[in-house]
Structure formats: structure tokens, C-alpha cells
Amino acid sequence: MTTDEFEIWFEKGVTDGLPVVPPTRSRVARMLAGTRRGPDELIGEMAPNYGRLTVEKAATNAVMAGCRPEYLPVVIAAAEGACDPAFNLHGMSASTHFAAPLIVVNGPIRSRIGLNSAFGVFGPGYRANATIGRALRLLMINVGGARPGETSMSTFGHPGRYTYCIAENEEASPWPPYHVSRGVAPETSAVTLFAGEAPHGISDHASRTAKALAGSLGWSMVGIWNSKHFPLYSHTMLIVGPEHARTFADDGWTRERLARHLHETVRVPYRTLVPDDDHGEGTNLRYGKTPPALDELIPKFPSPDEIHVVVAGGTAGRFSVAIPGWLGTKNGSRPVTRPVEFD
């Protein structure tokens, strides 16, 4: 057995494949200073193995991920969301699907700890984004037991399974912050956990009206999951870039109107969704004995409530991003939102 302070953690099997910061007692103690909660307090039981997740375990994995103590309240809120049965971490972790927990942060905590919400929001360069998302993944491995090929059975996964954490660009948004639409006061910091695939980029540099841009974004999302999956199994998150958001706001569109428009207009006749030799798989609609009429229009999105609109990204460039979710039925995952407790 090696005595190297970094190699030893690979041998213990507690990393995500990258080196971790050794969680010495002094480092964990400093991390725990970032919260008023006691180290033995139970946050929840983390699937799929339902390990007992305490504040101290959250702090230990936050150290390993490279977090600063002031990040710990966000890690704890994300962990609480992951343990909520509504999020269904067990199903998402064990599924053969692609999804990973995306952490979306709102409120004053964003600027306090230096979370990126703007240019390169899904990319590298910001310690808070990188390490908070990584801390949740390490908890999923070390407390939940989500190990690839053992309990975590995603056929491909995606890079967000290393770290997947962003903040909403509230300063560039023309709308109330996303967490307000989730029932949280604007002055309260909050974390929303969304079971999402990798970001699917959408480019539209030409549309100058809300209706045209909504059509462009909506019809660009037809292919997510499968171009014949009408309606989707899942929730969808639409990350609207600030330039696109301004186009909607200039025409007086709210985020609710955008979601409603996407649900009402991105529809195709049932006849185009049936299986055929050229396309293969057909619609995932469940019928009894009578299928819809061939000309009945079937929506891509199950409902407006299952389209989540967040503003993020840099203020230059007319781009947006679609993130398909993982199963929105009663057996799937629902986004969950938790307040962040910090001094």
C-alpha cells in the first residue's frame, strides 16, 4: 500500500478519477466552520445505497473536492435536494440514461462565494462552480455508492458527472430570478437540483421577435431524447442566453409565456410519429385501445410546468442551451429546490 498522500485515496476507491485534497482533521474542522449545523446532524440518506449523510460527511467530501468553507452551505442544500425522494436519485443513478444532477444557484450567495453565471458558465475557470458540483458527485460515490458499472449504470454518462453547477445570471435577466418561480423569496439564496443531460447548444443570430425566436428555440429542441418522442418523458431546462432573453423581454414576454408558447406550438401530427422502416422508433405515447387520430397534433413537451426557463451565460452571443431531463413521470425525477442557510 502506498504512503503517498494523494495516491492513497485512489487505492481507497473514494475519488472521481481525479486527485482529491486529503481530508485531514484540521481541514474538515475548518470546513465545518462554514455552517452553523452540527457535524452529526443527519442531512438524509443518499441513494442508491442509502448511506447516512451527515454534515460532517458533507464537509469531508467538500474538502476532497477542493471547496472553501463558505461553499459548504451550498453543498449541504444540494445534498438535501439529492436526498429528497421527489428527485429520485436512486433511479437516476442506477439508470442507463445519461443524466447527472445539475445544481442551479440563485440569490445573494452567488456573488458572495464567486459563482459564475456568465461567460463560459458550463466550463472551467471558477473554483466555486467546479468544486461545489464535484462535492455532490463525491458524496454520491462515497455515501450513495454510485460507482460506474456497479450501481451507476449509465451507458455513456456525460462530463457533467464530474461537476455540474451554475448560477443564474440574475443581473442580465429581464425576469424575476428562477427560484422565485419555485416559490422562494428573491432575497433568499436557493439551490435547484435538476436531473439533466449535457447541454445542447442552440444558435439563433437572426430572429428579432419573441415569436420567431421562441419558434427557433422550440423546433431546435424537437430532437432531444428522440425526434419522435412526443411528448417527452421528462422535464426540460431551457437556459436562455442574455441576448435572447432581451429579445423576449422587448416584446413583453415573460418566462411563463415562453414556456406556454413552446408547449402550445411545438406539435406535430400523430401520423408523423408512428414507427416506420426509415426512422425506426416511434412515439412514446401510451394509449388504450384507440390511438389518436392521424392528424391530431401531439405536443413535444408534456406541459408548460415541465419547461424550466433559466437565464445564464455571457452577454455577447445569441445562443441558448437546452438540457433534457430524466423521466418526468411518477417514477422519474422532479426538480427540487432548497434554501441555502448561511450567515
Image (tube, grey):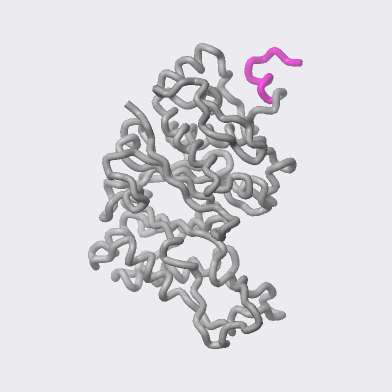
Q: Does residue 114 sit above or below 211 in this rendering? A: above
Q: Position of residue 51 (x, y in %)?
A: 63, 32
- In this image, 286 relative to 196: left or right? right
| Residue that appears at 42% across and 30% down | 73
Q: Position of residue 183 (x, y in %)?
A: 34, 49
- In this image, 174 relative to 6: left or right? left
Q: Is 6 in the magenta? A: yes
Q: Give the range drawn in magenta.
A: 1-10
Is residue 48 visible to us here? yes
| Secondary structure mainly formed by the magenta segment | loop
The image shows a total of numbered marks equal to 0
- In this image, 136 relative to 104: left or right? right
| Residue 329 falls in image quadrant | bottom right
Q: Quadrant of the C terminus?
A: top left
| Residue that appears at 42% across and 76% down | 265
Q: Does residue 170 sit above or below 15 in this rendering? A: below
Q: Where is residue 315 in the image (x, y as percent from the top left)?
A: 31, 51
| Residue that appears at 34% across and 38% down | 189
| Residue that appears at 45% across and 56% down | 237
Is residue 123 visible to us here? no
Q: Position of residue 324 (x, y in %)?
A: 52, 58
Return the residue nearer the eye: 28 or 36.
36
Q: Quadrant of the N terminus?
A: top right
Q: Is 120 in the magenta? A: no
Return the residue nearer the eye: 157 or 261.
261
